[in-house]
Image (spheres, helix red, strand yellow):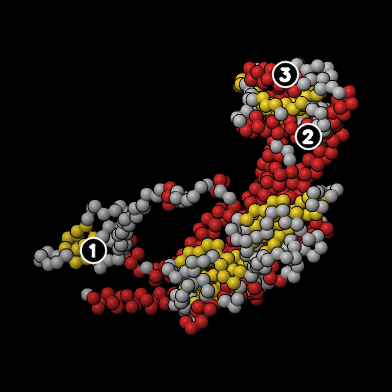
Amino acid sequence: MDDGVSETMALMRRRLFTVNSAVASMAIAALAIALLVDSMVARVVCGLIIAAAGVYFFAWWRTARDPDRDSDSGAGDDPHSHFPDSAMKKLLFDDYQSSAGKYVVREVEEEGRKVVPSTKSVRPVPQVLKEETLRQMEIPDFFDLDSDTPYSETEPKSEFHSLANKVLLVLKDVLFAHSVAFFWANREKHQMVLESMATDSDLFMATKRFGMESDLVSQVAATGKPQILGRVNPASEKDLLRYYQSPSYVKSALGVPVFFMDRARGILPVGVIVADSKAEDAFGQETLEVLGRFTKLVSALIKSYTDKYDLLLDSELLSSIRRMQDRVRSDPGEQTILTALADEAHRLANWDYLTVAMYAEDRHGWSLQKVVNRAGQPYVAPDQLVDAQGSIVGSVIATNKIADVQDLTAETRFRFHASETLERTGSFLCIPISSMNRCYGALTLESRHVNQFTGNEIETMYRLVEHAASSLEVLYMNNLVKDYVAVDHLTGSLTRRHFLKTLEDEVRRAEDFGTELASVSLAIDSMDDLHARYGRDGCDVILNETVKILRASLRPYDVLGRLENDRLGVLLINTAASDGYLWAEKMRKHVSSHVITVGSRSFSVTLSAGVCGLSEGMGFDALVAGTTQVLGKALEHGGNLVRVY
């Protein structure tokens, strides 16, 4: 039976080959006719024949590719079918299988033999993948809760340092590096300064800086070009990688410059990012491309840091000027201005020695009126005269120009005077204290380190000194005006100059006519404490109330004047010293019992007085000296007293 079936199948294949050949011949002939005959109808007929041949061959190809489809088409979708005369089969399948796709069916033999899978092709059952369970993410996975003060509350330097640390940590993980560090290039001091680093080494440098020489970091900073070392010679590692205290057995390293655009000098490398590894040839061109993106990020951070730092310097300068104004307003005077200038200079710059040179009228020359020595080393003494010729300070005062000496070892001129014995090391800065009209002196700052003062610090100090010069000019102008103004603007009494001029005239009048004259000097006790408690406005109220009490007890021809901020003077015409004592004691009691109100607070003050009567042969100077002397004794004994000369 099998032989007959085989012969039948062979005969069918031969016939099918013949039919295929005939159809192919007809298609080729139709194609040739369509190309040669110039008739539309003939071409359409030939096209139909070619299309029919194409459909036939497509059907034949499908049948030849999947011969089981036609043979099993009568069995429906069941892949396991048998002829009617074949034996019965037992089929086994699992109805718990997924409904997607076909079932896997197995045939079971009757003699108890093993279950064998069907040889029919079936679609495999897809495996159900177990869904991966993700770890519950929390805030610390995305935000650094252990960071320092929020960036909005930190100074720009701390903020930049924190961000640079985070960038280097990421860069170290990306490059699989042993160490990654960022260095500033300080060209003024010829140093490489460590800003941040991320390392696995315990041998990283403990100091913050090293000099610019021929090592890898310095070469990149000097040339502005990246460098890759595929293999680091162990013998030269200490010289090439100077940021390690001792050899760390690094095999490869690279350094890339970080650029920044300066308005004055253009684009310059301001820093270097260096990375190393303990594997040879760990870095290549692709590493440079990655680092190039990181250097752009660091440059953007530097730009932000620089802008914020400039704003911070301006803010600190304005704060210093405001504090100086408050101090001068509360206690106007030359020493107050100079002390405030020294205190604010301490906040704005780092220095070891500070001096202020001003013109001394009594010595007819420039002298050091203030000296601050924070280093504790021998330095120039206060009241030292300055050589106007040949010294740095004298030259600054004469030319009204700043002198910035970054290295004193290269300076031939002396700083203050020719006989000074100061060490010639470090840096020296001298700024003229000048306004638009005149130069009042000079401020000097000195450090034991070379290249200490940067351009920003010099500019900031110049602005501070400029404001101090304006305050001095206002002070001197006010003093000049007071010399020509007869009445004090606050109390309505005579100013010191006109009171003393009137006192001198009354002394001569009393000597000529032989009359009595008593001079009384009065001071409000503990004026400094009152000023600290109630402020300047409160002290003005106290002074005005006291003047009102005194004026109410004076005769029209008696004279009242303001000698100092807290002192008053009274001339009692035709009055003996004993009567002057009684009048002063009366005023003391009136003032101490008077209630003064400042804002919502009420209080009382006490008064001390010194009385001196004009005696025969006593001149103007002796009268003034005697009055001042007895007032001083009253104050020494606790105040609230009246003393007579």
Query: Decide: marks 2, 3 in contact (CB < 8 A)?
Result: no
Q: Mark 2 or 3 closer to N-term?
A: 3
Alpha carbon distance from label 1 to label 3 = 147 Å
Circle 1: residue type: His
- Image coords of residue 438 (percent x, y): 84, 50
Q: Classify 10 Å Cα crowding around label 3: few (below 14), some (14-19), many (20 and above).
A: some
The quadrant of the rendering that contains the C terminus is top right
Name the residue rendered at 58%, 55% in the picture: 157
Confirm whether residue 182 shows in the render: no
Q: Which residue is mark 2?
A: 622
Disc 1 vs disc 3: which is toward the camera? 3
Circle 2 SS class: helix
In the figure, 197 relative to 332: above or below? below
In the figure, 11 relative to 194: above or below? below
- Image coords of residue 174 (percent x, y): 48, 65
Q: Which residue is mark 1?
A: 82
Q: Mark 1 or 2 closer to N-term?
A: 1
Name the residue rendered at 29%, 78% in the picture: 7
Name the residue rendered at 51%, 66% in the picture: 207
Circle 1 SS class: loop
Alpha carbon distance from label 1 to label 2 = 150 Å
Q: Classify 10 Å Cα crowding around label 1: few (below 14), some (14-19), many (20 and above).
A: few
Q: Classify 10 Å Cα crowding around label 2: few (below 14), some (14-19), many (20 and above).
A: some
- Relative to the observer, which residue lies in front, 331 or 166? 331
Alpha carbon distance from label 2 to label 3 = 22 Å
Query: Decide: marks 1, 3 in contact (CB < 8 A)?
Result: no
Q: Which residue is mark 3?
A: 583
- Relative to the observer, which residue lies in front, 298 or 592? 592
